[in-house]
Amino acid sequence: MRLLHDQTATLPYIRFMLVYPRGSVQDPHGLCGLTHLTTRLALRGAGGRNLLAFHRELDSLGSSLDVQVGARWTTIHGDCMPSTLRRFAALLRDLLAAPAMEQAELAALQSQHREALVGERENDEQLFSLFIPRHLFGANPHANPTAGLESCIGRITRDHVVQLWDQSFRRRPAIAAVVGSIDEASARDTLEQILQGFPEAQPFAPAPAPETRAAEGTPRLMLVETPGLTQVHAGFASLAPSATDPDYIPLHLANTAFGELFTGPLVAELRGRRGWCYSTDSIYSPWPGFGVQTVVLATGAAEGPKALALAHRLFRAQASKGLTAKELDFARLHLIRRHPFSLSNPFTRMKTVVRMLLSARQPSWLDDYQANIEALTLPQVNDALQRHWLTCPLAALAVVPPASAARYSRSLAPATLERVDWMHDWEA
């Protein structure tokens, strides 16, 4: 277990983060959402307390406990005052060692969760977030929605959740982070109180990285057809280098220049000049072993086809012509001046350090960040763009009203076109 500690006496409370090497990519086929459902159920009673008794005690401490499930990792995090540290630690110990996992609570949670998943499909932004990983990754486990699928939730039994908790969370975490008004020795003692007798977490066996699913050139297009839409969410995504790849920093800066700044081509053309989009962004997300480059647009239904086609042309054009020295310098200045905000307080810094570790970077990456940005040259950035943006296979997706296929096909001339209904569930 790796301990991260930051003592800040001026803060009135203490925050704990326990990070486990278990996420949605490890959910078995047909049980997508098992990790999410298991962790939510664990919060519904522990240490001989039912749901109300557990949360009544937590509330009496003025504390909070929650769980965040990601693709490869799950984080249990909570806050307490120094004066309630021992009682909070005992409560967290009970959560890890003896969650109730009651059958009645599981049934209620399954019913609520299925309804929530169906409700999310009424939001076109949520639909885009749900379908773009599936369109990009195909059958690879990285396509699994973190919250699961309606068709899988009912298959999850109490035996499934108990076994998963025993194998993954009744152990020592891979990373423990403690921040706030507590010294390192007390932090270690408290963690030992919480984790005493727990074996180490099992080594993380990552799911295989996705492979490219399309030929170079025009995108594969998926249309998620939803009745009654007057606006659409659309965009495209591609695989990209991981955060430990030498091209990551050059592409990180190029992505900033292209689509994160209001003055960049993406925002300036689609929002500023034409007014086609009320929101647009370009996002480069590093994962262990690979990264994902995504361009996202929110626009009116009538402007959707031409906005998506223009975003695609701008993306390829940026790679073809490269950045200018002026664009490079401006983006560099923006990143250097923005960087301190990721370190602005102890909690933000700790979350950032944990995020570095989860993407296979070391905490020193943060300290070297400014120097690495300053050292970038224009040829480095433009060479990386040529290698990764110019011909990379793109998976384009749009959440659209029915009968939009012809307009999108004319505007984008996709390599392939797939149409699915908004209530489509690929495990059904």
Image: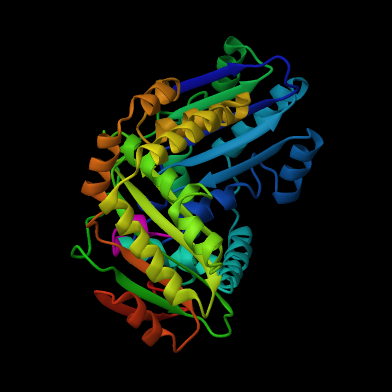
Q: Nearer the viewer, residue 52 or 80?
A: 80
Residue 421 place in picture, x, y as percent: 44, 82
* Residue 249, picture quadrant: top left
Q: Nearer the viewer, residue 174 or 223?
A: 223
Quarter of the picture holding the C terminus: bottom left
* Residue 360, picture quadrant: top left
Q: Which residues are magenta?
A: 137-146
Residue 394 place in picture, x, y as percent: 29, 62
338 to 392, vertically: above or below:
above
Q: Nearer the viewer, residue 233 or 47?
A: 233
413 to 86, vertically: above or below:
below
Residue 136 place in picture, x, y as percent: 32, 62
Q: Main secondary structure of the magenta part?
A: loop
Residue at (62% x, 43% y) in the render: 66
Quarter of the picture holding the N terminus: top left
Q: Find the residue positioned furthest to the right.
A: 60
Magenta includes 138? yes
Q: Nearer the viewer, residue 403 or 274?
A: 274
92 to 119, vertically: above or below:
above
Say if residue 23 shows up in the picture. no
For residue 8, side relative to residue 393 (left or right): right
